Amino acid sequence: MKPYAVGVDVGGTTVKIGIFSKAGDLFKKWEIPTRTENNGQEILPDIAASIRETLQDNGLSLEQVEGVGIDVPGAVLDSSVVNRAVNLGWGVVPVSTTLSALIDGVRVEVCNDANAAALGEMWKGGGAGFDNIVMVTLGTGVGGGIILGGRILDGAAGAAGEIGHINVNEHESAPCGCGKCGHLEQYASATGIANIAAKKLAEGKKDSSLKQYDEVTAKEVFDEAKKGDALALEIVEEVTDILGRALGIISCVVDPEAFVIGGGVSKAGQIPRRLVGRAPCWSRRWS
Ligand SMILES: [Zn+2]
């Protein structure tokens, strides 16, 4: 009997691991640090050792595990080989075969992290009941996963759905993490929102309660916007306008049933309706 599955989420600073029933019920979850030194060559051995140890501590064994699903912040080919994950220091890494060999041949499947989030949301979350969704993760960066007809859209090099790198501002001179300029990630991620706030505060055109913070975070921008701070509201309007326009463009191409928005920024909550300005003309025309 193999009643369990293991899920692994490899991030730039921590690896989150969970033991689940095959129906998706979480049995145990824990974290280990991501050791990115030496081109991240310790990451997979660390994961294997941690899975073994935790299974043993809970009276379980690898023989009871049907498979391991692992997601990484990078492009993935054939659910098996990672084709560059910059934040992990990885170039081309055959993750399935390498990790499987370290855990007694248990089957390992690999997925891009935003794609894994999209599949998870379709199975158990905000996309449940739909076959066609676009997942957008607003965190340190902006990730995207597209599911059409129940299947992830991979693309030729495993890089489909990289929504964060859509150009939304051709006049931007500051570079995106990818090296090019004016990408969605530079505005709609937590980092982007904080950067916009810092820039507007430095310009000093408006007095703002955001001045009380040494380094303004995205959370503080949303918190102050909810209290009615004019500059914070201006930033929220600008950011959501850019995000809305990008999602509108995606919608024309993909025709999804739903957009699912996740990541830390999605916890911002509602801004009271009375504080939000008039919609710009391009959206008002259709309302
Ligand atoms: Zn970019």
Image (tube, rainbow, N blue to C red):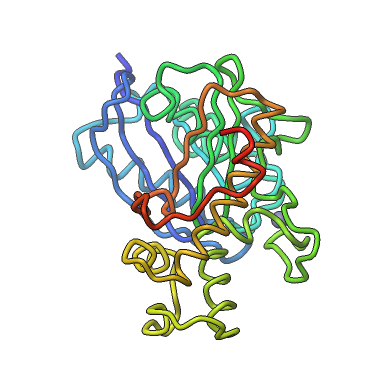
Residue 40, given in percent of the width and then of the height, sits at 58, 58
Q: Quadrant of residue 81?
A: top right
The percent position of residue 173, horizontal first and vertical second, equals: 78, 70
Q: Nearer the viewer, residue 26 or 132?
A: 132
* In front of the other: 148 or 269: 269
Say which residue appears at 70% left-offset and 28% top-offset: 252
Q: On the image, which quarter does residue 210 sit in? A: bottom left
Q: Residue at x 30, y 45 (%)?
A: 53
Residue 29 position within the rendered picture, expressed as x and y whole percent measured from the top left? 28, 43
Quarter holding the C terminus is: top right
- Where is 13 relative to 215, above or below? above
Q: Residue at x 32, y 24 (%)?
A: 24
**Residue in front for this viewpoint, 148 or 99:** 148
The reply, left or right, for residue 79 in relation to residue 173 is left
Residue 39 falls in which quadrant of the image?
Answer: bottom right
Is the N terminus in the top left, top right, bottom left or bottom right quadrant? Answer: top left
Query: Which quadrant contains ligand 1?
Result: bottom right
Residue 279 location, x and y as percent? 55, 48
How many marks do you count on the picture? 0
Q: Residue at x 59, y 14 (%)?
A: 149
Horizontal arrangement in the rendering, residue 233 relative to residue 83 (left or right): left
